[in-house]
Amino acid sequence: MHFCRMNYILFSVASCIMLACTAVKTPAVKSAKNYQIAFYNVENLFDTINAPEKRDGEYTPEGSKEWDTEKYLQKLDRIAQVIASIDSAESLAAIGLAEIENRLVLEDLSKHKSIAHLGLQILHKESPDFRGIDVALLYNPQILKEIESNFIEIDINDSGKTTRDILKARLVDNSNDTILIYVNHWPSRWGGKEASNRKRIAAATALKMDLDKEELDCKILIMGDLNDYPTNESVISVLGADSVMGGRLYNATFPIHADTTQGTHAYKGHWGVLDHAILSNNLMVDIDSVYVHRKQYMLYKTRNGDWFPSRTHGGKKYFAGYSDHLPIVVNFK
């Protein structure tokens, strides 16, 4: 049986037996679909330890950013505060993360006093990224259970430079419904949009090849910082994530992209959507909304009076902010 084809017969029979065997009313259980799944590029969550096999020297006390324990703990405070605010309705099922260094920072984050009560479980693997950053998924075991997970490698053919793997996780919720989640962080635009385009095409191609192996009735959520906008070639043409419902994939961030007053990232004084939530068409019936999680404390005011994401660093300058990205949240009915 394919994981994404759910058999409800045993579940229904068991439910009927339970109802028939008791006449006592029990407190209502919160709907299993009343939850949220988010993605957040946390902007370089590094520990302070210099790992010889990684290019993390600047994120050490002796490095150019003078990254010490005080700054690291403050960064954890910031990210945990954001995660807790997403979970303000006690409904955070999972959050995909980008730009985290290793499992240690994930363990420190998940144990933070602001979110420790969630008991978040970690899905992570050291990726071959030349900068030493990875993607990960933290999930709430009270809402989601892991069936399986693995990682998709991306060959960008760039003179020894490597990029982040794509995390692929199959999970089941409390209503016995399975969802396949992909967490992405595609190659950046460093060196120029056109010159780097082929790298994001390579990432989109790797993801599309894996998607094509899945059953058409599989419920899919693709999240991540794709370093491209919804209208760019890698997203709309190669991956096939369109603004029109009816195909296999719908890019639910298109409406946000169309609104120039909001976004997940700001560049040269303009909002843009680099962080995506892409849904399989059959998942749409479960979705209430897709939105950018934006709190005033996550922003700073520019000289022009605009409010943009308050980042941790600008070059070597330390701003003590949160991240240069805002989270994208998928709200399930």
Image (spheres, rainbow, N blue to C red):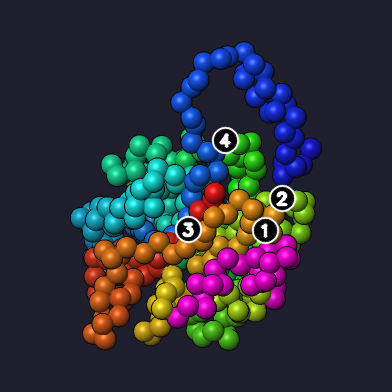
Near-viewer residue (277 or 183): 277
Q: Is residue 238 left or right of residue 328?
A: right
190 vs 39: above or below? below
Image point (68%, 64%), residue name: 249
Tag 1 secondary structure: strand
Q: Earlier in the sequence, mark 4 or mark 3?
A: 4
Tag 3 secondary structure: strand
How many neighbours does mark 3 have within 10 angstroms: few (below 14), some (14-19), or many (20 or more)? many
Task: Check disc 4 and report the residue beneath it.
Answer: 174
The N terminus: image quadrant: top right
Tag 2 secondary structure: loop
Mark 2 vs mark 3, CA separation in Å: 21 Å
Task: Check disc 1 and report the residue beneath it.
Answer: 280
Amino acid type, mark 1: Ser
Give the quadrant of residue 173.
top right
Mark 1 vs mark 4, CA separation in Å: 20 Å
Near-viewer residue (164 or 136): 136
Task: Check disc 2 and report the residue beneath it.
Answer: 218
Task: Check disc 3 and report the residue beneath it.
Answer: 329
Q: Earlier in the sequence, mark 3 or mark 1?
A: 1
Do the residues under discs 1 and 2 have CB atoms within 8 angstroms?
A: yes
Instruction: State whether residue 133 appears in this view.
Output: no
Q: Earlier in the sequence, mark 1 or mark 4?
A: 4
